[in-house]
Amino acid sequence: MGEADAARIAPMFKALGDPVRLRLAAMIAAHSEICVCDLTPHFAVSGATISHHLKVLREAGLVDCERRGTWVHYWVKPEALQSLSALLQSVPA
Amino acid sequence: MGEADAARIAPMFKALGDPVRLRLAAMIAAHSEICVCDLTPHFAVSGATISHHLKVLREAGLVDCERRGTWVHYWVKPEALQSLSALLQSVPA
DNA sequence: CCTCTGAATCGATGTTCGTCGAAACAGGAT
DNA sequence: ATCCTGTTTCGACGAACATCGATTCAGAGG
């Protein structure tokens, strides 16, 4: 893996490297899509913090979102997770 | 994914979330084992920094090492990478 | 024993990160 | 228009991080 690849991929792993974000990603992935308001109550941190973590996941390219009226819905981008999985799986057992 | 699982797994992703560590892990994974002295020259940071990053990978449970005489050899723990891969792959495409 | 080399640790420094409360924004509903 | 609620942004703060040079540790070989 070259420097350029590492610079592109590391932020995705980094985004999953926080317990709150990892759980957020898992919860989003467990549904085809989910509203922020259904995410927040499961965490012991403020809504502002949840919003911040969702932004990190978004900027890493792992999730995407859309506002529909009052609520904002999030979903995962499966191809991103898939590429990370493939990378990890390329290690000979 | 519960809080406990997230707390256990997130540090592994976090360890891979730095470009230097991701490249280190990839280089180690590309060999059955490799000496620190063969790793260091590929990076633009000091030996002290490489040593620090290897420690992070070690403490995350992703790699292990053994001193054999003068040199220290590192190798990946495939089961760790495998479990992360499986987690990512559990997302329905 | 002493020295040399590879690697890890220590101590310090500047940067990034996670978190919060407060403020701003978006879109219904009255 | 005005409020109300869900979400994001802003500004700030302490903690954690990446990095370095200097030091220490571990072994091999004189």
Image (spheres, coloured by chain):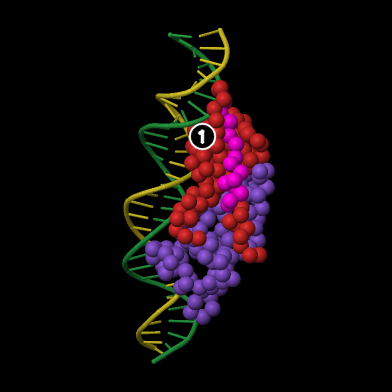
Chain colours: A purple, B red, C green, D yellow
Q: Is residue B50 magenta?
A: no
Q: Residue at x 42, y 69 (%)?
A: A41
**Does residue B83 lie above or below C12 as drawn?**
below
Looking at the rendered structure, the secondary structure element under dot 1 is helix
Residue B3 image-quadrant placement: bottom left
Q: What's drawn in magenta, residue-wise?
A: B71-84
Q: How many marks?
A: 1
Q: Is residue B74 magenta?
A: yes
Instruction: State the quadrant of the C terminus of chain B.
Output: bottom right
Q: Residue at x 52, y 46 (%)?
A: B15
Query: Percent from the top left, x then y, of residue B9?
Result: 51, 52
Which residue position holds label 1? B51
Identity, as a three-letter code, of the amino acid under mark 1: Ser
Query: Percent from the top left, x then y, of residue B18?
Result: 54, 46
**Does residue A13 lie above or below B61 as drawn?**
below
Residue B43 image-quadrant placement: top right
State left or right for residue B17 relative to residue A46: right
State left or right for residue A82 relative to residue D18: right
Closest to the observer, C26 or B34: B34
Q: Residue at x 55, y 37 (%)?
A: B64
Q: Residue at x 61, y 44 (%)?
A: B78
Q: Is residue A56 visible?
A: no
Residue A29 image-quadrant placement: bottom right
Query: Percent from the top left, x then y, of residue B91?
Result: 61, 62
What chain does badge 1 belong to?
B
- How packed mark 1 is, by other alpha carbons closer than 10 Å (few <14, some 14-19, many 20 or more), is few
Closest to the observer, B60 or B82: B82
Query: Percent from the top left, x then y, of residue B88?
Result: 60, 57
